[in-house]
Amino acid sequence: MFTSDNGLFHGEHRVRNGKVLVYEPSIRVPLVLRGPGVRRGAHRRKLVTNADLAPTIRDAANARPGRLEDGRSLFPLLRDSGREWGRDLLIEGNAGVNGGFSALRTYRYVYVE
């Protein structure tokens, strides 16, 4: 599994650098999975969140959670390319940086306050 903690601006939206705005370059992160149950060369463009990583690792290890999990295992999405969860994602920015923000990300829209 390879991922990162956040995206980073490199001049997009006239933002020289940084990572604390709700634009796509800042909220998207890479996620690469390889191993049993992950088909080689498969590519998905589904809305998932960092909270889905722990349930995915637990599922791969065939372990049982000791607590209620916030995310969902990504394996159902990996097995079925047409599967959708139908959930929107909450994105929050630090209130101490640029005033902070709360946003709802759907496949089509981003609503920000």
Image (cartoon, grey):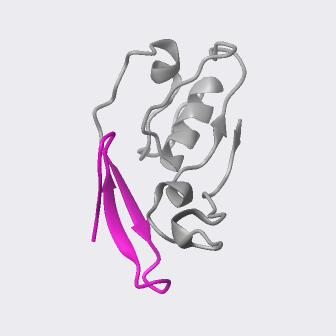
Query: Is residue 28 toward the left or the right of residue 22 in the image?
Result: right
Depth check: 23 or 46 in front? 23
Residues drawn in magenta: 88-113
Q: Percent x, y for residue 23?
A: 46, 61
State the residue at coordinates (57%, 41%): 53
Numbered label tally: 0
State the residue at coordinates (45%, 13%): 80
Q: Percent x, y for residue 41?
A: 67, 16
Q: Say if the magenta span includes residue 111.
A: yes
Q: Say which quadrant the N terminus sits in.
A: top right
Q: Is residue 85 above or below residue 4?
A: above
**Residue 10 sits in which quadrant?**
bottom right
State the residue at coordinates (64%, 13%): 39
Q: Percent x, y for residue 97?
A: 50, 83
Query: Is residue 40 toward the left or the right of residue 86 in the image?
Result: right
Q: Percent x, y for residue 107?
A: 33, 39
State the residue at coordinates (41%, 45%): 68
Query: Is residue 41 toward the left or the right of residue 14 in the image?
Result: right
Q: Is residue 109 above or below residue 65?
A: below
Q: Say if the magenta span includes residue 64.
A: no
Depth check: 107 or 89 in front? 107
Q: Say which quadrant the C terminus sits in.
A: bottom left
